[in-house]
Image (tube, rainbow, N blue to C red):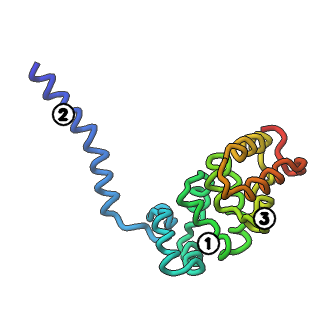
Amino acid sequence: MRIRSVTRLVLLWLLLALPIGLTALAASTQPTPGAPVEATRVLTARALAARIAENGARNSVAQLDRQQAWPHVIRAVSSGWDGWIVLVPDLIANTDKTHVTALQGALRRAIVRNPHAVLQVLDPGNGPLLGGGAICVDTRMPKRWRTDVIRGVQGVHDIHLNHQVTDCLTALHAPLTETADSGK
């Protein structure tokens, strides 16, 4: 009986030793020169918001460029996370056309997951960068996306977002474009 418990403890120790050792090693290792910044540093929405407040959006966007952090930002916005979505207006107004297009696409993907947060950052005047007419279009989106977004946007009942809801639904009810994916 005693031998079994000792054996179990030894096995448990062996199982835990490797992950603990690897964690300690990773914590003590310096980043590899040339490694992607995203692999060595975690950027949070809160940290980026503080950076924008402290240094301004233009400087923060330049820093995102230098740190090659855009893929992380685009994925976070696409995931529909509120903290990231709220940063999009500052980012989109201070970046280049490539990143504007990427951020618009990220909002398009996010609206399925979090329509309320996306509608909150849309321009109530239906502007060219962040208006419902720019974001709520089926550009390279599957057919299912359109029905899911219509359902989600119709489910947002916030009087402060009436203009954004109307603009978005108008764009969603426009005829499908040639670039819409018809099979998904």
Answer left or right for 113 relative to 50.
right
Tell me how far mark 1 sits from mark 2, CA to CA. Answer: 55 Å
What residue do we see at 88% from left, 50% from top? 174
Q: Decide which of 172, 100 is in the foreground and name it.
A: 172
Q: Quadrant of the N terminus?
A: top left
Q: Give the vertical position of 112 relative to 51 (above or below).
A: above
User: In front: mark 1 or mark 3?
Assistant: 3
Label 2 belongs to which residue? 10
Residue type at numbered disc 2: Val
Instruction: Determine whether label 3 and label 2 are within 8 Å by CB.
Output: no
Q: Nearer the viewer, mark 1 or mark 2?
A: 1
Residue 59 point in image, percent of width and height: 56, 81
- Residue type at mark 3: give it: Asn
The residue carrying mark 3 is: 126
Total marks shown come to 3
Q: CA distance from mark 3 to mark 2?
A: 65 Å
Q: Which residue is at 46% across, 71% downward?
A: 33
- Which residue is at the front of the view, 56 or 5? 56
115 w.r.t. 104: above or below: above
Label 3: which secondary element: loop
Determine whether the residue tagged by mark 2 lies in a helix, strand or loop.
helix
First-in-chain label (1 vs 2): 2
Q: Residue furthest top?
A: 1
Q: Pick whichever of labels 3 and 2 is earlier in the sequence.
A: 2
- Reading the image, the residue beneath label 1 is 90
